[in-house]
Image (cartoon, rainbow, N blue to C red):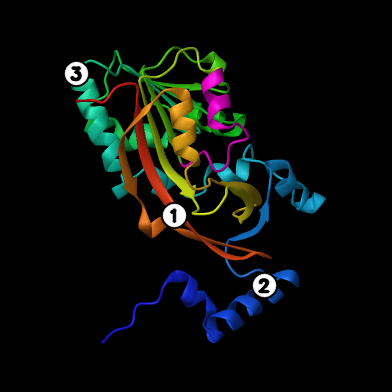
Amino acid sequence: MATILSRKTFGKLPVIRRLKKSILLRSFRGKEIGVFRGRFSTYEDAQRSLPPSALSGYDDEQLVAGNLESFSLIHAFDWPVIALCQRLIREAKLHTMTDFGGHVGVKYYAFEKMLGLKSGFAWQVVDVPAMIREGRARIAPGNVVLKFFETLEETGPAEGLLLSGVLQYAHLSIEEIFAKLPKKPYIVFLNKVPVSDRCGYFTIEKYVKPLPYRIYGAGELDTIRERLGYQRVAQWPIPYRNIITLSSSGMDLVNMIGEAWCLDELS
């Protein structure tokens, strides 16, 4: 008869304990295993852990082309967003989307045919100057749907807000993002959000350059959503994007999820 080990029991097995210890020792010697390392209380603490030569932000020309082809495709985790957008467009409840952290418009290019985005719809991308410059350079002549902005304050009122793979990198909290919008959106899509079953924290991601990376704590998104006055109308797991962070506290399995928040129940 097969024996099922709990996560706690599994972590206490001698071989796993030796593996954890080995990983941590190698990490302390500056030879981190894995992409995510460290555990910090704030974005600033995470950034201060980096040597001056490694300090960077997302406003960097080297990051513009990173994974650009993959970002512009439709992935399995995009389908819940697409399905809800199709419904809201049919019901004339969605005319403008603000895509915060939208890169060079990658989700616009991925979704435009599925959503039938034409003149009269506005897709507003907000990102750092390096991304915006490249996005504007790539836009096709005569495209009146896709627009680029460097700040949320510059955008027009929008019924939809897309936060896809951005909350872990943003300097702003979700509440701060909302405070800068000209209008409270009717629907909010949060996709590729890293959530731990522990308290929230920041780590460092070893990307093209090391970057602070936010992990949300258990129940934290629910608390924020309720405070902002939204109902969760959909939630989906993204299991093949889960990550492991390494720190002096051990290894932490972080789940990647997606959610949709709406001002009503979408009956």
217 is within the stretch colored magenta = no
- Select label 2 or label 3 by which is in front: 2
Q: Residue at x 64, y 48 (%)?
A: 211
Establish if 151 lies above or below 233.
above
Q: Residue at x 55, y 33 (%)?
A: 131
Establish if 249 lies above or below 160.
below
- 2 or 136: nearer the viewer: 2
Q: Which residue is mark 1?
A: 255
Q: Quadrant of the N terminus?
A: bottom left
Q: In the displayed structure, does residue 199 sit left or right of residue 93?
A: right
Q: Gap between marks 1 and 2, in whole Å?
A: 21 Å
Q: Which mark is residue 91?
A: 3
Instruction: Say which quarter of the image contains residue 87.
Output: top left
Q: Gap between marks 2 and 3, in whole Å?
A: 53 Å
Q: Residue at x 61, y 46 (%)?
A: 62
Instruction: Say which quarter of the image contains residue 124.
Output: top left
Q: In the displayed structure, does residue 89 sit left or right of residue 135?
A: left
Q: Main secondary structure of the magenta part?
A: loop
Give the residue at the far right of this rendering: 52
- Select label 1 or label 3 by which is in front: 1
Q: Gap between marks 1 and 3, in whole Å?
A: 33 Å
The magenta region covers 165-179
Task: Check disc 2 and report its element: helix, strand or loop.
Answer: helix
Point out residue 265 in the picture as x, y percentages from the top left corner: 26, 26
- 61 or 83: nearer the viewer: 83
Q: In the displayed structure, does residue 238 sit left or right of residue 23?
A: left
- 101 or 191: nearer the viewer: 191
Dot 2 or dot 3, earlier in sequence = 2
Q: Residues within 10 Å of mark 1 (few under 14, many from 20)?
A: many
